[in-house]
Image (spheres, rainbow, N blue to C red):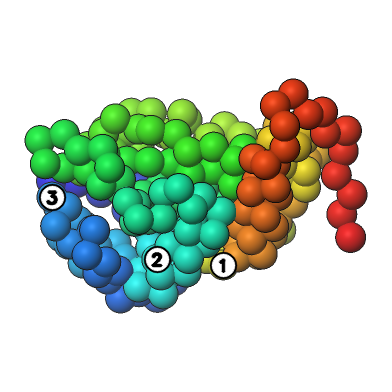
Amino acid sequence: MFQRFRAEYAPLRDAIPAGSTWRHERLVGVDGYLDFASEFAGATFGGGLYRVHDHASGAQASTLIAEAFPEYATRVCPFGYDWLGRQFAVDSGRTVAGQPQVLLLEPGTGEALEVPLSFAVFHDKELVEYAEAALATGFFDSWSGENGDSVPLRRDQCVGYRVPLFLGGQDVIENLEVSDLEVYWSICGQLRRRALNLPPGTVINGVTKR
């Protein structure tokens, strides 16, 4: 298990200290998770392209998800995150053959996207065969090509949208900036919750940063 992920991503692993395994009750029973985490907990790949949670970052991410996406707080547990700050989690509300499926939570779009794959298949197939779709690798290459001094990203950083897409921001490099991961999630979460309370059809003309 995870041979394909190891072959593809181990050469991209950044030289940072390993973390302790994130042992949340929703994760420890997932097929392959503990073996995977024993090798990759706290790992960063490709300068921040994909990162695996350790105990500290996993607990923080759970709190951030609960605040930004409260409707998923009791059913998901994050196991990794990407350069855009998007969290990948197992979703106990969706299972196939007893295994929770993956859920992608995007702070910049305010959306939660269902990925019909288990933890193991996500790593050994999705991230290997469909890395562009899963991690926006082409967008990362374009951004990092213009912002080489910001790579590698620290584990507490992400590349966030200056104006979130769900508030009319554009999905372009010019709308990106390196952000503190916790601050970015907190701001997007507050904006998302407020936007959800707006009447249908409300037009948001812009966002002013203070």
| Residue 39 in view of the camera | no
Dot 2: few (<14), some (14–19), or many (≥20) neighbours within 10 Å? many
Relative to the observer, which residue lies in front, 148 or 129?
129
Of the image marks 2 and 3, the number of the one nearer the N terminus? 3
In the image, is 53 to the left or to the right of 161? left
| Residue bearing the label numbered 3 | 31
| Residue 131 in view of the camera | yes
Residue 53: percent from the left, percent from the top?
Answer: 38, 63
Residue at mark 2 to residue at mark 3: CA–CA distance: 18 Å
How many marks can you see? 3
Of the image marks 1 and 2, the number of the one nearer the N terminus? 2
Say what amino acid the circle numbered 1 marks.
Asp
Q: Which element type, helix, strand or loop, lies under badge 2?
A: helix
Q: Which element type, helix, strand or loop, lies under badge 3?
A: loop
Q: Nearer the viewer, mark 3 or mark 1?
A: 3
| Residue bearing the label numbered 2 | 58
Seen at 24% across and 69% down, the residue is: 23
Residue 80: percent from the left, percent from the top?
Answer: 39, 54
Seen at 48% across and 38% down, the residue is: 112
Q: Is residue 181 above or below residue 18?
A: above
Relative to the observer, which residue lies in front, 169 or 205?
205
Say what amino acid the circle numbered 2 marks.
Gly
Residue at mark 1 to residue at mark 2: CA–CA distance: 12 Å
Q: Is residue 139 above or below residue 107?
A: above
Residue at mark 3 to residue at mark 1: CA–CA distance: 28 Å
Say what amino acid the circle numbered 3 marks.
Asp
Q: Nearer the viewer, mark 1 or mark 2?
A: 2
| Residue bearing the label numbered 1 | 156
